[in-house]
Image (spheres, rainbow, N blue to C red):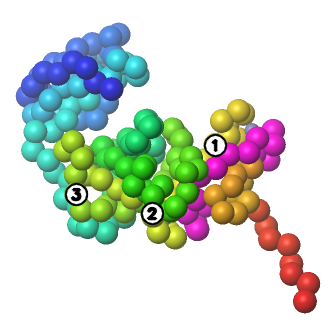
């Protein structure tokens, strides 16, 4: 995660394209990167991406409201999300977190819930962790909507109860799948 911070103002030059990529609230013009809002400059050393975290938080969420997100990073206890409230405005993304331990406790299961790159739908639980809104994967509609195979990156097929199978290489994984997961194994017709 970010390990260098500095306060920047709108229009302030942050750096040049050769050093890092423009992330959230940054603007690239002729090789120079500028801040578009007043905030804290964060440079992610892993991805070489510069972000400006607005000092004035503009994300207003109501408890129980749903968002879509891409899982950006996972740790033992938390997953970091790149969230969007409106799929038609993907540039208005914000950071959120999932408490993986809390969700596992509620599911009474110790399976791996999400992996980096998964697209998920989750619900705001009404509180923040480290300043970031906290979300949950609990609920039938919530969970992973699409996940890729860790071995060959093909989209995984949900074969039921969170078990996933890769149609290309046969790899098996687990996820907390939403009932709207994109690819599901067709159930065999029950013979009565
Ligand atoms: Zn595979």
Residue shown at the point (64%, 50%) measured from the top left: 174
Q: What stretch is highlighted in magenta?
A: 166-182
Given residues 124 and 43, the one toward you in this image is: 124
Q: Name the residue under label 3.
A: 127
Which of the two residues, 109 or 156, is positioned nearer the viewer here? 109
The rendered magenta stretch, by its main secondary structure, is classed as loop
Q: Mark 1 points at which residue?
A: 148
> In terms of sequence position, does the residue under pointer 2 or pointer 1 come before the other?
2
Relative vertical location of residue 60 with respect to residue 36 in this rendering, above or below: below
Residue 39 — which label? none
Label 1 to label 3, Cα distance in Å? 30 Å
Kindly report the distance in space between the C-alpha atoms of the residues bearing marks 2 and 1.
25 Å
Residue 158 screen position, x and y as percent: 69, 57
Discs 2/1, front: 2
Q: Do the residues labelled 1 and 3 touch (CB within 8 Å)?
A: no
Along the horizontal axis of the image, is 132 left or right of 140? left
Label of residue 106 in the image: 2
* Residue under the point 31% across and 30% down: 23
Indicate whether residue 32 is drawn in magenta: no
Given this view, does label 3 or label 2 mark the residue nearer the observer?
Answer: 2
Quadrant of the snapshot with the C terminus: bottom right
Residue 186's spot in the image, x, y percent? 79, 67
Q: Is residue 174 magenta?
A: yes
């Amino acid at each position: 995660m970010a390990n260098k911070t500095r306060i920047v103002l709108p229009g302030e030059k942050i750096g040049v394209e050769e050093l890092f990529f423009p992330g959230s609230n940054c603007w690239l013009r002729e090789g120079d990167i500028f801040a578009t809002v007043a905030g804290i400059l964060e440079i992610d050393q892993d991805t070489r991406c510069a972000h400006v975290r607005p000092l004035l938080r503009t994300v207003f969420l109501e408890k129980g409201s749903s968002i879509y997100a891409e899982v950006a990073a996972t740790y033992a206890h938390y997953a970091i999300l790149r969230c969007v409230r409106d799929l038609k405005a993907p540039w208005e993304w914000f950071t959120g977190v999932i408490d993986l331990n809390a969700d596992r406790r509620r599911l009474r299961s110790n399976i791996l819930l999400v992996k980096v790159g998964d697209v998920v739908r989750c619900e705001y639980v009404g509180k923040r962790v480290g300043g970031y809104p906290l979300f949950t994967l609990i609920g039938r509609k919530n969970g992973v909507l699409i996940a890729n195979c860790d071995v060959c990156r093909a989209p995984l097929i949900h074969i039921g109860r969170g078990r996933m199978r890769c149609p290309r290489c046969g790899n098996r994984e687990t996820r907390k799948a939403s009932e709207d997961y994109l690819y599901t194994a067709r159930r065999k017709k029950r013979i009565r």
